Amino acid sequence: MFDDLPDDLPRLQTLRVWHAHWLRRIDAKIQATEQRAREVEQGRRARPAPPEWVVELGIGDGRPPVQVHAGDCYAVGKRRRPVGRDEARRLLAEGLPGCTHCQPDTRLGILGLSPRPAPRLTTVH
Protein backbone atom coordinates (compact mmCIF):
# COMPACT_ATOMS: atom_id res chain seq x y z
CA MET A 1 0.00 0.00 0.00
CA PHE A 2 2.61 2.58 1.08
CA ASP A 3 5.81 1.36 -0.49
CA ASP A 4 7.87 4.30 0.73
CA LEU A 5 7.62 3.21 4.40
CA PRO A 6 10.30 0.98 5.92
CA ASP A 7 9.61 -2.75 6.19
CA ASP A 8 10.99 -3.36 9.69
CA LEU A 9 8.86 -3.00 12.80
CA PRO A 10 11.27 -0.89 14.95
CA ARG A 11 11.52 1.88 12.35
CA LEU A 12 7.73 1.84 11.76
CA GLN A 13 7.17 2.19 15.53
CA THR A 14 9.68 5.03 15.66
CA LEU A 15 7.84 6.83 12.86
CA ARG A 16 4.54 6.31 14.64
CA VAL A 17 5.90 7.78 17.90
CA TRP A 18 7.42 10.71 16.01
CA HIS A 19 4.17 11.47 14.19
CA ALA A 20 2.12 11.10 17.39
CA HIS A 21 4.47 13.60 19.04
CA TRP A 22 3.93 16.09 16.20
CA LEU A 23 0.15 15.61 16.31
CA ARG A 24 0.18 16.45 20.04
CA ARG A 25 2.22 19.61 19.31
CA ILE A 26 -0.10 20.63 16.48
CA ASP A 27 -3.20 19.99 18.60
CA ALA A 28 -1.74 22.05 21.46
CA LYS A 29 -0.98 24.92 19.06
CA ILE A 30 -4.53 24.75 17.66
CA GLN A 31 -5.98 24.92 21.17
CA ALA A 32 -3.75 27.83 22.14
CA THR A 33 -4.65 29.72 18.96
CA GLU A 34 -8.37 29.13 19.50
CA GLN A 35 -8.07 30.26 23.14
CA ARG A 36 -6.26 33.44 22.06
CA ALA A 37 -8.99 34.15 19.48
CA ARG A 38 -11.66 33.72 22.19
CA GLU A 39 -9.76 36.12 24.49
CA VAL A 40 -9.39 38.72 21.74
CA GLU A 41 -13.12 38.54 20.95
CA GLN A 42 -14.02 38.77 24.64
CA GLY A 43 -11.75 41.81 25.01
CA ARG A 44 -13.30 43.43 21.94
CA ARG A 45 -16.80 42.96 23.35
CA ALA A 46 -15.82 44.17 26.84
CA ARG A 47 -14.00 47.29 25.60
CA PRO A 48 -15.84 50.44 26.62
CA ALA A 49 -17.22 52.58 23.83
CA PRO A 50 -15.08 55.60 22.97
CA PRO A 51 -16.36 58.91 24.34
CA GLU A 52 -18.52 60.92 21.99
CA TRP A 53 -16.54 64.14 22.60
CA VAL A 54 -13.06 64.82 23.98
CA VAL A 55 -11.29 67.92 25.24
CA GLU A 56 -7.57 68.00 24.65
CA LEU A 57 -5.79 69.41 27.69
CA GLY A 58 -2.76 71.64 27.80
CA ILE A 59 0.26 71.35 30.03
CA GLY A 60 1.07 73.32 33.10
CA ASP A 61 -0.89 74.45 36.11
CA GLY A 62 -4.49 73.32 35.94
CA ARG A 63 -4.09 71.71 32.50
CA PRO A 64 -6.38 74.15 30.69
CA PRO A 65 -8.49 72.89 27.79
CA VAL A 66 -6.85 73.50 24.42
CA GLN A 67 -9.14 72.04 21.77
CA VAL A 68 -12.40 70.13 21.34
CA HIS A 69 -12.39 66.87 19.36
CA ALA A 70 -14.90 64.23 18.36
CA GLY A 71 -14.33 61.03 20.31
CA ASP A 72 -13.15 59.15 17.23
CA CYS A 73 -10.65 61.81 16.11
CA TYR A 74 -7.21 60.51 15.24
CA ALA A 75 -5.55 63.88 15.96
CA VAL A 76 -6.38 64.13 19.65
CA GLY A 77 -3.32 64.25 21.89
CA LYS A 78 -2.45 62.08 24.85
CA ARG A 79 -3.72 64.58 27.46
CA ARG A 80 -7.47 64.45 27.12
CA ARG A 81 -10.71 64.31 29.04
CA PRO A 82 -14.03 62.91 27.82
CA VAL A 83 -16.89 65.39 27.90
CA GLY A 84 -20.58 65.26 27.16
CA ARG A 85 -22.30 66.82 24.17
CA ASP A 86 -23.53 69.84 26.13
CA GLU A 87 -20.10 70.64 27.57
CA ALA A 88 -18.48 70.30 24.14
CA ARG A 89 -21.04 72.75 22.72
CA ARG A 90 -20.49 75.15 25.63
CA LEU A 91 -16.71 75.07 25.25
CA LEU A 92 -16.95 75.74 21.52
CA ALA A 93 -19.44 78.55 22.08
CA GLU A 94 -17.08 80.12 24.64
CA GLY A 95 -14.35 80.28 22.01
CA LEU A 96 -12.33 77.12 22.56
CA PRO A 97 -11.20 76.04 19.09
CA GLY A 98 -12.45 72.86 17.53
CA CYS A 99 -10.14 70.43 15.82
CA THR A 100 -9.68 71.19 12.13
CA HIS A 101 -9.56 67.49 11.30
CA CYS A 102 -12.75 66.17 12.90
CA GLN A 103 -14.60 69.54 12.96
CA PRO A 104 -16.68 69.08 16.12
CA ASP A 105 -18.47 72.40 15.60
CA THR A 106 -19.89 71.14 12.31
CA ARG A 107 -20.81 67.77 13.82
CA LEU A 108 -22.55 69.51 16.70
CA GLY A 109 -24.46 71.76 14.34
CA ILE A 110 -22.85 74.96 15.60
CA LEU A 111 -22.53 77.45 12.77
CA GLY A 112 -20.75 80.77 12.56
CA LEU A 113 -17.98 80.13 15.06
CA SER A 114 -14.69 81.55 14.01
CA PRO A 115 -11.59 79.88 15.43
CA ARG A 116 -9.28 81.83 17.69
CA PRO A 117 -6.60 83.61 15.72
CA ALA A 118 -3.33 81.72 15.58
CA PRO A 119 -0.50 83.27 17.58
CA ARG A 120 1.81 85.41 15.46
CA LEU A 121 5.32 84.15 15.15
CA THR A 122 7.98 86.80 15.22
CA THR A 123 11.34 86.36 13.65
CA VAL A 124 14.49 87.45 15.40
CA HIS A 125 16.96 89.30 13.19
Image (cartoon, rainbow, N blue to C red):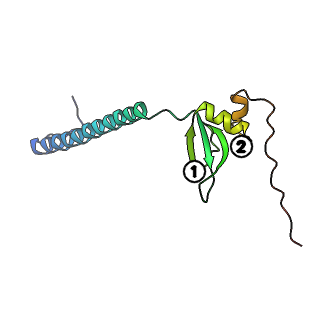
Mark 2, other Cα within 10 Å: few <14 / some 14–19 / many ≥20 = many
When asked about the image quadrant of residue 52, the answer is top right
Task: Measuring from the top left, give residue 31's x and y in whole percent.
Answer: 27, 36
Q: Residue furthest bottom?
A: 125
Which residue lies at the image location 54% right of the left edge and 35% below the top edge? 51
Which residue lies at the image location 78% right of the left edge and 29% below the top edge? 111
Q: Secondary structure at mark 2?
A: loop
Q: Amino acid at mark 1?
A: Arg
Mark 1, other Cα within 10 Å: few <14 / some 14–19 / many ≥20 = some
Task: Measuring from the top left, give residue 101's x and y in whole percent.
Answer: 71, 39
Q: Amino acid at mark 2?
A: Leu
Q: Is residue 43 above or below residue 58?
A: above
Q: Pointer 1: what residue?
A: 79
Whichever of callouts 2 and 1 sits on the residue coming sooner in the sequence is 1
Q: Pointer 2: what residue?
A: 96
Between 113 and 49, the residue placed more toward the observer is 113
Q: Is residue 52 above or below residue 63?
A: above
Task: Measuring from the top left, give residue 44's x and y in whole percent.
Answer: 43, 33
Q: Secondary structure at mark 1?
A: loop
CA separation in Å, label 2 and label 1 = 16 Å
The N terminus lies in quadrant = top left
Task: Measuring from the top left, give residue 28's x and y in whole percent.
Answer: 25, 40
Q: Nearer the viewer, mark 2 or mark 1?
A: 2
Q: Residue furthest left?
A: 9
